[in-house]
Image (cartoon, rainbow, N blue to C red):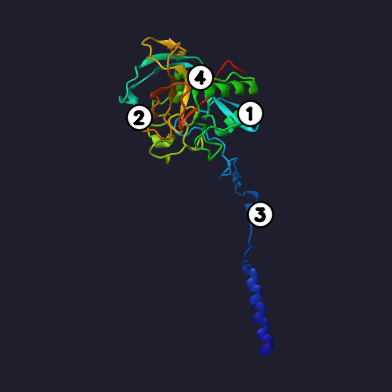
Amino acid sequence: MKRTIITLLLLLCIAMANAQGIITHPAPGKTTAQKKHGTTPARRSKSGTTSSAAPSLPRPTLGTSNYTPNVRSFRVGNVTFEMVEVQGGTFTMGTTKEQDASYIYKPHKVTLSSYYIGRTEVTQELWKEVMNYNPSYFQEGDKRPVVTVTWNDCQAFISKLNALTGQNFRLPTEAEWEFAARGGTKSRGYKYSGSNTLDDVAWCKGNSGDNAHDVATKHPNELGIYDMSGNASEWCSDWYGSYSEALVTNPQGPSSGSNRVFRGGGWRHAAVYCRCASRNAYMSTSTYYYLGLRLAISATER
């Protein structure tokens, strides 16, 4: 009788355990969900360093969250790059009120036709695909802007790029560069390209760690364009000269000069050089480890 009672108690315990369910622990290793949604493995660059695969470029967040830019994509070999439309309009170029008066550049009205400008600076991977070498001082990642290039180097690169694509890429004019940096017709009047807080939109002297960074890792401006206030300074097509006092349409700069314009602060520059209106110039044969380029193309080009 006692044995029967014990047996019944054991059977009752087993039944209760089954009713509550048995907790099991998975074997070591990836679960099905981890295998399906696992992280992207790091890729090895040609220089031997590793970096995570670059995410797709996000839409504007600080400038105008409801604006979706018109973007054209181009491909050279295995490298894709994007150009953002800047719709034509009239703006005040130079030291406007929000730009402060640390350096005065005569404010004047400029009217521009529509054009496209690079969504990012030209990267090292694009330059290498076209030119088959990398001139950059920093070569830790293909997604970093190409730097240490002269104005003449940029012309050679663009000539080869055009031969490969059948397009007519060029450097932006100084006026085109500033209009795009200010956000074009979508401008909110920021001091820097996309924000009044430099750290939001730029790799510069205060946060760069004395190095260039992957493009498009800060917030874009109102048009969805990245890094126009920092990371790499950028050559423009113009000779450096005084601004006109009159309204000008599609200005090309002086017909001659001794120095070419470059715009945008770089990773080593203080905030004053990162303003949308700040301008500088070097000889076309000069090269510096913070100086790169951004492409432009006329809207009429197809």
Write down the residue under mark 3: 32
The quadrant holding residue 178 is top left
Three-letter code, disc 2: Val
* Label 3 or label 1, whichever comes before in sequence order: 3
Q: Are marks 2 and 3 in contact (CB under 8 Å)?
A: no
**Spatial distance from mark 2 to mark 4, Cα to Cα?**
27 Å
- Per the model, the C-alpha gap separating discs 3 and 1 is 36 Å
For mark 1, does the 10 Å Cα neighbourhood hold few (<14), some (14 to 19), or many (20 or more) residues?
few
Q: Disc 2 designates what residue?
A: 272
- Report the mark closest to the observer, 1 or 4: 1
Q: Residue at x 57, y 20 (%)?
A: 169
Foreground of the two, 240 or 23? 240
Marks 2 and 3, the one that precedes in the sequence: 3
Pointer 3 local density, CA inside 10 Å: few below 14, some 14–19, many at least 20: few
For mark 4, what is the residue? 87
Labels 4 and 3: the sequence-earlier one: 3
Residue in the image at 49% along x and 35% along y: 137
Residue 201 at least partly seen: yes
Q: On the rendered image, what quadrant is the C terminus found in?
A: top right
Q: Secondary structure at mark 1?
A: strand
Residue 75: image tag: 1
For this view, does 264 lie left or right of residue 25? left
Q: Residue at x 63, y 62 (%)?
A: 28
On screen, residue 163 above or below 244: below
Q: Do the residues bearing badges 3 and 1 touch, measured as CB atoms within 8 Å? A: no
Type of residue at label 3? Answer: Thr
| Circles 2 and 4 in contact, beta carbons < 8 Å | no
CB-based contact (under 8 Å), mark 1 and mark 2: no
Q: Could you say which quadrant of the image residue 17 lies in?
A: bottom right
